[in-house]
Amino acid sequence: EDQVTQSPEALRLQEGESSSLNCSYTVSGLRGLFWYRQDPGKGPEFLFTLYSAGEEKEKERLKATLTKKESFLHITAPKPEDSATYLCAVRRIGGSYIPTFGRGTSLIVHP
Amino acid sequence: EPEVTQTPSHQVTQMGQEVILRCVPISNHLYFYWYRQILGQKVEFLVSFYNNEISEKSEIFDDQFSVERPDGSNFTLKIRSTKLEDSAMYFCASTKESPSTDTQYFGPGTRLTVL
């Protein structure tokens, strides 16, 4: 069974304090790893898709990286508007194409 | 930028009542999905739909649930007889062509409260 574990569950940062969120996964062949941002009471908003180890993608203050066992979402000099829950999901090769989601990391950035 | 829309944003119902949640997927997308998220829990897959039929469903999607694409734009989730444990956020999502490679884009969700 595919497993996605995100850590930490919650993270509080001061504005400008860079950090990383972790997504560890177990899947029998990775087709894609997805990062989403979810604001309270809203739907997941797509951020990145990573397909192979070594791949990196960036968007503003966010940078996602991928290894064979985990992905990191690096947040550089975060701002209060970056506060949200960040979800990781994996899709495997073969069988169901439905992504498996992790529980998310709740990020709060204090001004 | 095209987006998935959902109505209503919040639905309150009595236990045992039927509810219909509505979604308008992105217009050129072919695959549609329903997910739910119980407060504080992770996003859970319910059902996927393609070419007017269910392509995959989870064990959560039992006989109380049904989906329909009644016209060229709407995609609905019906819960026949709601239970307290059906209270959750329900998200619709869609992908453009290939469900195995394309990104799923989510709507804003419907908060269902069953009293």
Image: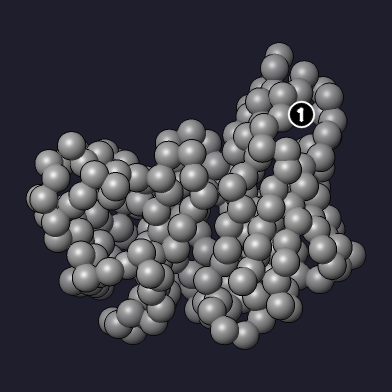
- Under tag 1, what secondary structure? loop
Establish if A95 lies above or below A11. below
Q: Is residue A7 visible?
A: yes
Q: Residue B101's spot in the image, x, y percent?
A: 61, 76
Q: Quadrant of residue A56?
A: bottom right
Q: Residue B11's spot in the image, x, y percent?
A: 22, 41
Residue at 54 percent across and 79 percent down: it is A96
The colouring scheme, among rainbow, by chain, secondary structure or one colour, is one colour
Q: Quadrant of residue A51?
A: bottom right
> Which of the two residues, A95 or A60, is positioned nearer the viewer here?
A95
Q: Residue B52's spot in the image, x, y percent?
A: 28, 81
**Horizontal side, residue A71 vs residue A106: left or right:** right
Residue at 53 percent across and 71 percent down: it is A98
Amino acid of disc 1: Pro
Q: Label 1 lies in what chain? A: A
Q: Quadrant of residue A60?
A: top right
**Horizontal side, residue B81 vs residue B72: left or right:** left
The local crowd at label 1, few if under 14, some if 14 to 19, many if 20 or more residues have their Cα within 10 Å, is many
> Which of the two residues, B62 or B33, is positioned nearer the viewer here?
B62
Residue at 62 percent across and 85 percent down: it is A94
**Horizontal side, residue B108 vs residue A17: left or right:** left
Q: Which residue is mark 1?
A: A78
Quadrant of image for the C terminus of chain B: top left
Residue at 89 percent across and 65 percent down: it is A54
Q: Residue B97's spot in the image, x, y percent?
A: 50, 78
Establish if A80 lies above or below A20. above
Q: Is residue A58 visible?
A: no
Establish if A56 lies above or below B49. above
